[in-house]
Amino acid sequence: MSVKYDKYYSEGPDALGPPTKILTDFLTDHLPAKARVLDVGCGQGRDALWLARRGHRVVGIDISTVGIGQLRDRAKAEGLDVTAHVADVETFDPDGEFDCVLFDRTLHMILDAPRRNAGFARLAGAVKQGGSCVVLDEADNIAGLLAELPEGWSQIWRPKAGFALRRV
């Protein structure tokens, strides 16, 4: 999978286009100032850069060395607070807690459901009390995930928009 995205990202710095409006609207309304955000599957940094430009502290992970390299270069050139790691959803060990853990069209790429759900649950567990875990994807891709999250989380679910949130 990383080879596919390395090639795709090599075609230009904005291969996936701008951040999704429904996501940016939601994050604008719900993130605290200077939030610490984990962007899972950040690629070239579409969401990570948008967040950092608004004063948030971002940690991004992706399996694409090309995407992470581009993100690091752009963040450095703009003086943004972004730390980017070549890392996998299943093995990345988050350093501390986050105000928000963001999965923007990432989870469906892990085809093995038990592995996907385990990686998701572990990273979603890095959300601090009062924080948010935001998943943006096709509703069919994520419906099974929502049933397996920890009890005690409140949920906002907008299946027609392909957007889901659980707040700790």
Image (tube, rainbow, N blue to C red):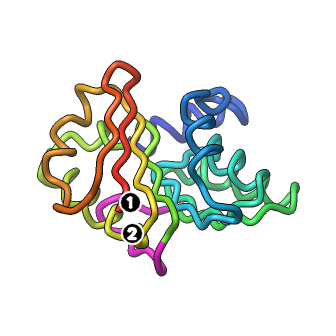
Q: Is residue 19 above or below residue 107?
A: above
Kindly identify the amino acid type of the residue bearing the numbered disc 2: Phe
Q: Work out whether 15 lies above or below 98.
A: above
Q: What residue appears at the point 41 percent right and 67 percent down from the top-left corner?
A: 127
Q: Position of residue 58 (x, y in %)?
A: 63, 62
CA neighbours of label 1 inside 10 A, class few (<14), some (14 to 19), many (20+):
some
Q: Residue at x 16, y 61 (%)?
A: 151
Residue position for label 1: 88
The majority secondary structure of the magenta stretch comes to loop
Compared to residue 133, the image places residue 131 above or below, namely below
Tell me the tag on residue 92. 2
Q: Quadrant of the rendered structure where residue 59 is? A: bottom right
At mark 1, the secondary structure is loop
Quarter of the figure with residue 128: bottom left
Q: Give the image location of residue 63, x and y in percent.
A: 45, 53
The residue drawn where x is 37% and y is 56% is 167
| Label 2–label 1 contact, CB within 8 A | yes
Q: Which residues are magenta?
A: 86-97
Q: Which mark is residue 43?
A: none
